[in-house]
Image (tube, rainbow, N blue to C red):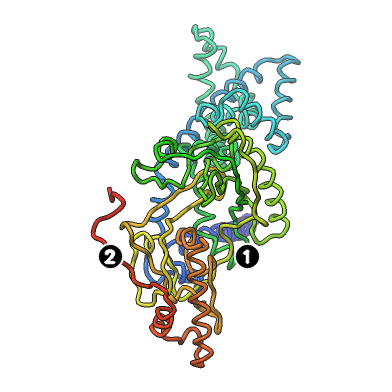
Amino acid sequence: MIDSECSKFSVGKFAATIVLVIVCLVMLTPIIFAVINSFKPYAEMMTSFVSFPNSLDLNNYVKAWKVANYQKSFFVSLVITVFGTIGAVLLASMASYKLARTKTRLSNFIFMVFVLAMTIPFHAIMIPLVQLANKLHITRSLIGIIPIYWGMYIPFAVFMLHGFVKTIPIELEEAAMLEGSRPMHTFFKIVFPLLRTPVATVCILDALSIWNDFLMPMLILSGNPNLKTIPMTQVNLFGQYTSEWNIAIAGMVLGLITTMFRIGGMPEVGKEQIEKFSKYPKGKVQPYFLFWEAPEFIYGHVCIFGTPRKGEYRCEMTRSVDKNGLNPDDLTKAEIECRRQIPKIVEYFRKEYPGAENVYLIDSAGTVGVQDSRRIVGEYEMTMDDLLECREFEDVIALGCYPIDLHNPMGRGYDMRFIKYPGQAYGIPYRCIVPAKIENLLVAGRCISADFYAESAIRISSTCMAIGEAAGTAAALCVVKHKSPRDLDANLLRQKLASQGVCLEQFVYNTPLVDEK
């Protein structure tokens, strides 16, 4: 009889173990695929997502580390997590101890208030919480976000620890009191050590939640570029590195949308004034470019360009984020949002900029502009390094010189990176406009095969026009020569473009424009 019961117990235990192992494997599957594909080049990832990489490529990690500044974001996340968790656990354990040992209606009521606080969803208090934080001037600082985390996580910790305190024999505390121990000393020397198991559980749960939290840091720390947690950094990388993943998997791209407009009546500005406002090094400022910080706008900066007409400037200051550039509903919301920002910007110039009291709106773009959406997977993917180093290709069909112009897809901020040598242009290979798996198709414009960084440079009108001329010429040659775009001789295309007056020669200089240090 005993053997039969042991056999049943062993079989049941073994079956439960198998089920748990399967559940663990299922939960680990996304992590396994993420790790495997993190070592693959983009083209290999797109063609063989589930296979192991042909070779370990660490360029993805190196690029992510440099661009995302992970050392700083790791430190910010660590400080918030450590102090947020320690503060919440200490305050909750002391409150739980006092409420459990005080047998009054008031203590029961306070405990129920903690319990009821757990039932309130964060989204219900999100807006009032941010408004209160703004009034108290504790946003954009670690000192402000850590106490907020205490308030968010203390109710759950009190609920967890309150019941455990009741299981501790009160005789231990009475014995300590007879020995002359004060309440605080009794708590930390006797009660708190006995709570190590539930305290460890609460610490793990709180630390994981705070470490992985994105919404709270975005609401409280947004606007301070020096205080970005790892989740905030990862979201930026998601928009920059994985827009291609979204195309392959769900066709969803996190786009940055803006509406250009023109203003008139601006005073003429000399180069000295521009350098006074500009964040660029002295001597590198263009006399037609105005740029300075304006944190009251979602764009985060004033950014206007001169036009041939006196007192007229083109403004690039509206911004709509967290919109899908492929979704008509999102585009409609972006249109409304950006156009509501324009009168506020015009009023800003009237009030803040000397001599611009009579500035007026001339016109605005007919529709919003989407910086990034779908891009093809071509025979070659142009990268940021290709542009900055001005690498030479045998099949160059267009040139460009506009810098890498990255706009933060989640809100304020931008990042401009200039090519290495003065006066030099980067070349765009013919292979970038030829899809890798589709025959008889050529593409032109911002949707050519390029990563997020390269696309931010080649998306401007003049470069897209040059690419479009090359694509149209290539299509005509394909018809004449009875060739598919993939089989077309790139040298023949280059000769035809040169005969049409297209410049395809990249000039080489030995003196870097950018200090490599």
Q: Secondary structure at mark 2?
A: loop
The amino acid type, in three-letter code, at marker 1 is: Gly
Q: Position of residue 306 (x, y in %)?
A: 51, 48
* Residue 311, picture quadrant: top right
Identify which residue is drawn at 51% across, 60% down.
Answer: 460
Single out the mark in the foreground, 1 or 2: 2
Compared to residue 289, the image places residue 496 above or below, namely below
Residue 163 at x, y percent in the picture: 65, 28
Q: Residue at x 34, y 71 (%)?
A: 505
Mark 1, Cα crowd under 10 Å, few <14 / some 14-19 / many 20+, is some
Image coordinates for residue 96, horizontal then vertical, percent: 62, 23
Q: Which disc number belongs to residue 508?
A: 2
Whether residue 7 is visible: no
Mark 2: which amino acid?
Val
Which mark, by number, is residue 251?
1
Q: Nearer the viewer, residue 316 or 8?
A: 316
Residue 166, by quadrant, is top right
**Residue occupying image coordinates x 30% and y 53%:** 513
Residue furthest left in the image: 510
Q: Earlier in the sequence, mark 1 or mark 2?
A: 1
Q: Relative to 492, say whether 409 is above or below.
A: above
Q: Locate the N terminus and report the quarter of the image it occupies.
A: bottom right
